[in-house]
Amino acid sequence: MKYLMLIYQDEKQFAALTEPERQKLYSEYGQLRQDLTAKGQFIGGSQLHPTATASSVRVRNGKELITDGPFAETHEQLGGYFLIEAKDLDEALGIAARIPSAREGTIEVRPIVERTAQAAA
Amino acid sequence: MTQASDTLEKVFREEHGRIIATLIRISGSFDLAEEALQEALVSAAAHWPREGEPRNPGAWLTTTAHRKLLDAVRREQTRTNKQAELEYESERLHPFDELILPEDVVEYPDDRLRLIFTCCHPSLSQEAQVALTLRTLGGLTTVEIARAFLVPEPTMAQRLVRAKSKIRLARIPYAVPSSDLLSERLAAVQAVTYLIFNEGYAATSGDALVRTDLCAEAIRLARVLCELMPNEPENYGLLALMLLQDSRRAARISDRGELVILEEQDRSKWDRKKIAEGIRLVEHALSLRRVGNYQIQAAIAAVHAEAETAKETDWPQIVALYRELIRINSSPIVALNHAVAVAMTGEVTKGLALMDQANANRKLEHYYLYHASRADLLRRLHHQDEAASAYRRALALTSNQIEQQYLRRRLREVVEKNGSGQKNTLPESS
């Protein structure tokens, strides 16, 4: 079972980190990624550039509308994600709690729709 | 015939949780399990009146439900095979490994625990936890749950459908949580149980009969917790607390339908059997030497229950217990109750000060009992004006008619006293 972990955090707060703080955070992320990889649970994951770099695209009546910024203005912004493999929600929640940003921000855990796997089963 | 259907209803209620828990484990599906049990019930309703009641009605229902489930699973497998090429979305929690024949079906005692923990999983909203627990473990119908919580039936039905589909899609495990999660998760189960009880006991609104059912259901659930997790003292504490509170049910409402406060209750109406069981359970819980929230609350309820008259209540003992409770539960409501107990030992002024301290961060501002208790102390200190305004504030905060009646009576008393007081002694600034 695959879960996407959406990492939400106040990006202003993240930007305000000192360099040593940032390095410490990155090394914690690196450690978690290594652990998950060793257990065969890591599928993918990345940090995202801040929402200032975001564009939103909508197609309405065949016409493309491109706007600056994220889809929704919120207190916490999507700053990265992990795609992981877990046997059930409890295992996934356990992993989410180990994501360093969970201490400041919020990790949204979403099960992935696995169509091909089920069609094959 | 009526006898058969009475038995059927009784057995259905009592065995529902046990049967459905095993059916869910076997099928991996809440829906398939519910359907199978429903079909077994229909079958029982047809057979029992004609052929007589089976010797062991519970076992009969279980076996029949298992057969119905197997039929349903076979039907579904045929359907799944046909649709395998299509993007068929499985309705099940987990892929089906093997078919288990009814003869081989074993009811693991853990099945009901699995069900309890799944229904009360923190990824479900508490509303959903309550609904799902009542539906599956209690065997209440969607209509009954909707009525008990004053929610339109379609809303409740949707709440249940959503919860079940979340369990399936997010794969909430059908399992007893690992030991590192257990105490936290058990606390959630206890909270849901107590919430069901309080919904029935406090009766913020709604049908009295259904409400009593909720209390009975919560007590039954707590009994299951004690049976399945006998080493958890808080389970006994919770059961004891509910039994002791429930023992006062008949004395809580006067013949005129007014709420009777503990002090004024006719103690001959208290249910002695429930009190005896409650006290025995508190003692057993405390003997396990891991004190907790429910155990202390139950111990407090036991002190009340042991007093022959309100006057004989051992208030210093209650104050001591609340002090203990404050150490593990920093809720302002506990602080409020501590303040009330202190006032009851005779130190009304100190009680009032503690009460204001309990509301120092304004957390009790919208809690009607804070204003009602404060009003009672102010009344006893003869601050009639302040008492009146506190009663008014409390009145505005409760929608329960019985509670409103009590508050109105008290309000009339202080207003009348104040009226005569003004004439005699108190030159009022207003």
Image (spheres, coloured by chain):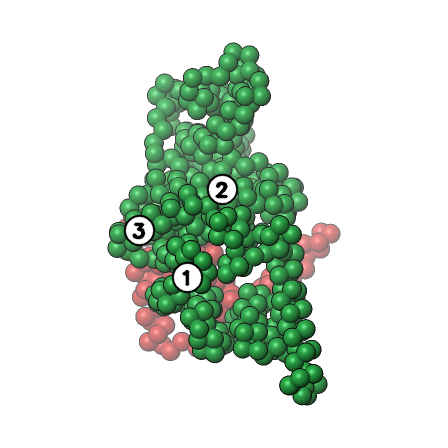
Chain colours: A red, B green
Which amino acid type corresponds to the residue marked 1 in the rendered image?
Answer: Glu
Q: Looking at the image, can residue A89 be seen?
A: no
**Is B12 left, or right, of B145 in this rendering?**
left
Q: Position of residue B389 (x, y in %)?
A: 64, 74
Considering the numbered disc 3 on the image, is that residue within a helix, a strand or a loop? helix
The label nearer to you, 1 versus 3, is: 1
| Same-chain status of marks 1 and 2 | yes
The extreme top residue here reads: B51
Work out how far the residue at label 1 is from the one at label 3, CA to CA, in angstroms. 21 Å
Q: As displayed, is residue B203 above or below residue B176?
A: below
Considering the numbered disc 1 on the image, is that residue within a helix, a strand or a loop? helix
Residue tagged 1: B312
* Residue A49: numbered disc: none
Q: Are marks 2 and 3 in contact (CB under 8 Å)?
A: no
Q: Earlier in the sequence, mark 1 or mark 2?
A: 2
Q: Looking at the image, can residue B154 be seen?
A: yes
Q: As displayed, is residue B215 above or below residue B37?
A: below
Which amino acid type corresponds to the residue marked 3 in the rendered image?
Answer: Glu
Q: Position of residue B34 (x, y in %)?
A: 51, 31
Q: Are marks 1 and 2 in contact (CB under 8 Å)?
A: no
Q: Position of residue B103 (x, y in %)?
A: 36, 18
Q: Quadrant of the C terminus of chain B?
A: bottom right
Packing grade of label 3 (10 A; few <14, some 14-19, many >=20) is some
Residue tagged 3: B283
* Residue B216: numbered disc: 2
Q: Quadrant of the N terminus of chain B?
A: top right
Q: As displayed, is residue B356 above or below residue B36?
A: below
